[in-house]
Image (cartoon, grey):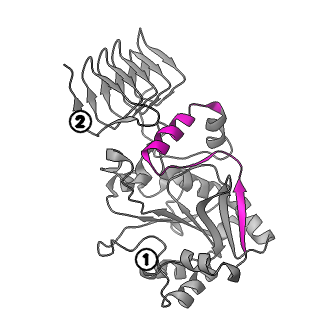
Amino acid sequence: MPQSMLGIINATHELDTFQNLTAHRSIAALPFAGRYRLIDFMLSNMVNSGITSVAIFTGHGVRSLMDHLGCGKQWDLDRKRDGLFVFTPDGKSKNEEFGSFSHLAKNITFFLRSRQKYVVITNCNIIGTINFSSVLDHHIETDANITEIVHNGESLQTYILEKDLLLSLFEQYKDQGYYSILDVINERLDNFKVEKYECTEYIATIDSLDSYYNHSMDMLKSTAYYQVFTKDEPIFTKVKDEPPTRYKIGAKVSNSLIANGCMIQGEVENCIISRAVKIGKGAVVRNSIIMQKTQIEDNCVLDGVIIDKDVKIESGVKLTGTRENPYVVEKGTVQKGR
């Protein structure tokens, strides 16, 4: 049954609610939990559900995302048949959002050539574990036209439907003034049997700086962490070979996720530290997200901050943010000391 599903991931979001974090990368490529990117979670959910054909529709500025995805090898999607397909915009359609009739029309050949009976449509910014095989079983058992996945009653904008229904809606309504197929479904709800599938495990949608910071901090709680990172349904990501993190004399770390390749000499508490980060002597870092290859020199004090990759924080700098308004440092910059 799983091989009959075609996976579609919407990675076209270009939200301006992440401050500088998305100035140099798409939301799909935003680092999460020290080692991962947001796209890893839906990609892994799909391959863990037995889906072997996945299409990612991207927005503009995808260099970082493309570098992360490569040919899909990390997700076992580098295949001669099916595999990973990435569709980038043609540069002429800024106002054509994912799922619009015009967007679908430009990529209709992909759907016509695919051999899968069902289509899973979801977004790149959902964190959590979703078994799409179970959702498909529910879809078939309830004889639904469309199954919508929800969490705590809220839509995750993730749907399963037959590919033929998707194509039928396209042909039937493309010239009747509707913008997208979802508009058709919402306005003509009585014409369809729409079932809901409730996810009961930890699920988060990352759509703002606030949600990014707070759901990242959730990963420091064992109850949330072990619902997202499970033994049976692992989250795959691009592998980067780094030595183990080195904790030097004076280092003190508590309740934190530390990626490999770091060197820590200061104090770290309630933090998410990406690979190859250096934290100097006497530095104190609390309640913060530090991205890869950042250097925090001696005697700095950081609390409630998000520091992008390749940043240098010079000795003695103090930066403070809050859970509601974390302080963000842009990629590749230098924070000078006095």
Left or right: 97 in relation to 137: left
Query: Which dot marks residue 194?
Result: none
Residue identified by numbered label 2: 333
Q: Is residue 5 above or below residue 230?
A: below
- Seen in the picture, residue 65 relative to 297 is either above or below; the reply is below
User: In which image quadrant can residue 7 be found?
Assistant: bottom right
- Name the residue that disc number 1 marks: 103
- Amino acid identity at mark 1: His
Where's residue 50, x and y in %?
65, 60
Q: Nearer the viewer, residue 115 or 96?
A: 96
Q: Residue 43 location in percent, x, y?
A: 54, 55
Does residue 210 show up magenta in the picture?
yes
- Quadrant location of the C terminus? top left
Q: Going 45% across and 82% down the picture, which residue do you hit? A: 105
Residue 249 placement, left or right of 203: left
Q: Farthest residue in the right direction?
A: 141
